[in-house]
Amino acid sequence: MRWSSLTLACLLVGATARADPRPVDRVVARVDGAPILLSELRLAARPRLAQLAGQPAWQRARVLRLALDEAREAAIAGALLSARARQRGLVIADAEVAAALAHIAGDQKLGVDELLAVARAAGFPAPAYRAELRRQLLEQRLLFTEPYGRAGSPPSGAARSAWLERRRDELLSELRGAHASSASVASDRALGRARLRAARGGAERRSAERVRRSDPGRHSTIELPSEPEWGARVSAVELRGTRRVPEALLRAAIEIRAGETLDEERVAADVRRLYALEAFSQVVAETDATPGGVRLRFVVEERRLVGRVDYRGIGALPLGRHVPLREGELFDPARIHRAAQGLEDHLVESGHLDARVRSHQRRDTETVDVCFAVEAGPRYTLAELVPVGNHSVPSSELSALVDDHDGEVNRPGAPFRPDLLGPARLRIQALYFDRGFLDVALGEPRVVRDEGSRTLRVEWPIQEGTVYRLARVTFSGKLRGPEQRYRELLGVAPGQVFSRARIAEGLGRIREHHETLGHSAQAVPEIELDPREGSVGLRVSIEERAP
């Protein structure tokens, strides 16, 4: 899955005049098919605006625009992490949220009700504050659940916050790579380079604008909204923009009625229901003043249909994992990116390392014709893939950890698949961690092309580092039995070579021990490295969950 899960909607720039319809909500992004709404960003921005209550309007407008942009990026990141947490089956119980609230209130020397009152005064209603706290708890649990990557194992003490930040950035980079179109990512980078050059003026500024216009996947600056007149009487509810979709279907999705009050949560729920019909590329809720209150209007933009589909530069479409675009599909810019990227990836995976696939579109009122321009380039095969710098682990053992799809790739004479080295990196790190090499470092593979033979030599540098041994093992938290019993369950002792696999097995036995006693517990490891001594201090915290 590449681009399908992450689609950013184009947003207009500029403030709306008071006499014009006022946008009260709209879709600003989509992650895994779920929309992110302007109302969510507005809620996140309110605490910052509350701090500027006495400032000039221009300053408040500037801060609001920045806050909305930051809130959008934070919402996308949070949605990506939440989607991964759902895939992992992770949940946060209500009791855990309540415990966290009590802990925060205690730190502030407040009661829970007082804490929620402070949050409400800052612009966070109690349900939103609890939801944000649940999201943060879920995110932290995910960071400790995912296999540790370049951030390394979690440290203890003050260094843990910095580790969590690095781990979050690392995981987000992975998730964005899995969800975003590579073509769009490349365009983002090109836009960044063009903008950097544009600061120096001249043709570079025009280049930046060309990049911006050529990338339909990018979102622009969020329209600066004024605060809607929540609580006003809704004098009428209107629909606009529908052509093919029956209006009755839309009416059935809208629950707010004329005569009721304009409510932010209910309007947002109606926007979500309309967007969930999967027939629209955008849904906007807007209002204009009437003598009796406000007129609420839902403006939809129907998705066009795909018209003619052409492929140029390639005779016949190769069979592969890519899903070709078909005439008559609902048009979706993300789908176009996905189809182009899928074909390009397939060609690269087949050995055409320089393959490029670009899409061109021509729109009319109802359809969009799409042309894919394909440049396959020459095909290369692998001569050898060799680890460099490994002294304690044989090269054959490391090479066996690289996925070769039953010898079809990443073996001499077959195409080279660099994308499969990512999972192999984690497996190699895990192997070294289980043998005590906690500061092992894997560099980026170096690919050398032989243009004469059309072959590749790939060297993968490895710095093994020091073998770490356990210096001490301590326990804290809710122990149900003598500490010696927990040492036996853990199964590791000072003086032994550190092994993450053995420790993980021991932590599992500790959890099972508590379950047999009728309690649900989590055994959380914390390690403290001493690089000069080549030793590790291990502390296991036993945390029981409320029944």
Image (cartoon, helix red, strand yellow):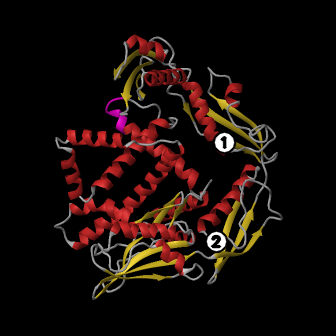
Q: Which mark is residue 420?
A: 1
Number of residue marks:
2
Q: Element at badge 1?
A: helix
x%, y% of residue 220? 45, 69
The magenta region covers: 156-161
Using the image as rendered, state which of residue 386 and residue 481 is in the foreground: 481
Q: From what the image shows, is residue 177 above or below residue 475? A: below
Image mark for residue 105: none
The nearer-to-camera label among 2 and 1 is: 2
Amino acid type of the residue that numbered disc 1 sits on in the rendered structure: Leu
Where is 19 relative to 98, above or below?
Answer: below
Furthest residue toward bottom = 291
Type of amino acid under label 2: Leu
Name the residue located 22 percent from the left edge and 42 percent from the top edge.
105
Callout 2 crowding tier (Cα within 10 Å): few <14, some 14–19, many ≥20: some
Between residue 479 and residue 343, name the one nearer to us.
479
Q: Residues within 10 Å of mark 1 (few under 14, many from 20)?
A: some
Q: Is residue 115 above or below residue 526?
A: below
Q: Is residue 64 left or right of residue 468?
A: left
Q: Secondary structure at mark 2?
A: loop
Residue located 46% across and 20% down the image: 513
Specify whether residue 202 is in view. Answer: no
Is 158 covered by the magenta stretch? yes
Quarter of the image containing the C terminus? top left
Left or right: where 341 falls relative to 491: right
Mark sitting on residue 330 = 2
Q: Position of residue 224 (x, y in %)?
A: 35, 72
Position in image of residue 414 (x %, y %): 79, 42
Q: Quadrant of residue 285?
A: bottom left
Vertical side of 513 occupied by 292: above or below: below
Q: Earlier in the sequence, mark 2 or mark 1?
A: 2
